[in-house]
Image (cartoon, rainbow, N blue to C red):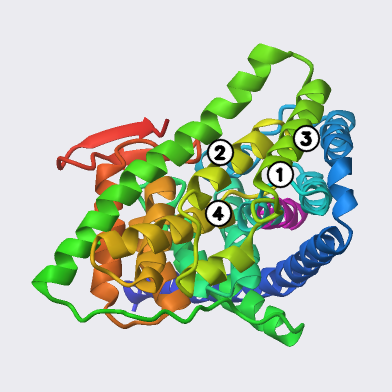
Amino acid sequence: MNELKPKIREAVQYLVNFFRWVILSCLLGLGIGAVAVIFHHGIDLATELRMTHPALLLALPAAGVVIVWLYNVCGMAHDRGTNQIFVCVRSATPVRLRTAPLIFVSTILTHLAGGSAGREGAALQLGGSMAAAAGRAIRLDEKDERIMVMCGMSAAFSALFGTPLTAAIFSLEVVSVGVMYYAAIVPCLLSALTALEVAKFMGLPPAGYAVTGIPDVSMLSIGQAALIGGACALLSILFCKAMHAAPHLYERITKNPLLRAALGGVIILALTALVGSQDYNGAGGHIITLALAGEARPEAFLLKILFTAVTLGAGFRGGEIVPILFTGATFGCVAGPLAGLSPSFGAALSMAALFCGATNCPISSMLLAFELFGGRSLSLFALCCWVSYMLSGYFGLYAEQKIVYSKFRTEWVDKKTH
């Protein structure tokens, strides 16, 4: 009997810990899910106002100055955005609660004035900072606070995009590629599912796209998918290099962050005038839909990279994930037929594969394809994504992301992306 007591205590402790995380993750999903939906509607309203009143674009330089000034007066001038959330997960470095309202307001302001940015990357900061503050408020230790942050990331991503599996696994996979924090797998999924239900209750439909021309798996389609994956690997390197290079180019021009923001706004205004449309301002979700229907301009993917790099490099705030999906969809719509695929299927393949090459998250990318496009010929999506992952090397969107294991050999490398 005495020998059983430690095992009984251990079993009870497991159950207590399990139900504690069930409660905490569902509460996070409820709260952060609701905030994320409000955030989504705020961005949609800002975009609608800009499209209805094109003159708002003229406020872009001033909007950039306001955003940088807000971060300065709040003591967040050196805020590293999503990278700071990664540092928090890896080493329990505190994330300030003020990150949430700042990224909320600044991202909406970026979209209102016409900067090229997304929302899901900003949601990672929004959810992560709110969850970290909640963890501190209930006095969790630093290890449990890390799980809270990943739950917050999952909840915000899921509510905004309607992809709970992708949201949960992405939060586990993206920080240290090759080492997944399995202790957080149930809490992250529960947070993501709860946030999704909150989003649906508040009238936000989950994302999903119709794709035509999906081939059956054959040796031909395997080769075609692999070819698109290789092309997306190269494109992901270009995307990441552009995002990393832009801030340094601005710094060479001027050391004053307010002037950099104003300059970025002026450049975006000039580019918009040259292009002659607002297709590359904001997130560009309608262009993704058109690309998946088989309509895309050949130069669209390069222009979106340029607009996004100029916007975020100048100090505007927002996410990079939707611009990645925009770039992938428009590239694949054009490149797919060159490889013998339908434009729609080529766009879908490239969306998932470019996301994989830029984020270095092969499992999340496959799940993204499943949740956005359905399960037909999922193995082709997986192959395309994983070829992109392998051939993109150690480049990545996030400077604080670590690749723990080599992409080419069964050995430990533990290096940051570049």
Q: In percent of the image, x 39 and y 38: which residue is there?
A: 237
104, 65: nearer the viewer: 65
User: Cα distance, mark 3 to mark 4?
Assistant: 21 Å
Q: Which residue is mark 1?
A: 272
Image location of residue 136, percent across then percent down: 73, 50
Q: Is residue 54 visible?
A: yes
**Alpha carbon of mark 2 to alpha carbon of mark 3: how far?**
30 Å
Q: Residue furthest left?
A: 219
Give the distance between the C-alpha atoms of the residues marked 3 and 1, in whole angstroms. 11 Å
Task: State the CA–CA distance, disc 4 to disc 1.
Answer: 21 Å
Determine which residue is flagged by label 4.
Answer: 321
Q: Amino acid type of disc 1?
A: Thr
Using the image, determine if residue 210 lies above or below residue 413. below
Instruction: Give the number of the mark in front: 2 or 3.
Output: 3
Number of the front mark, 1 or 2 = 1
**Residue occupying image coordinates x 76% and y 24%:** 260
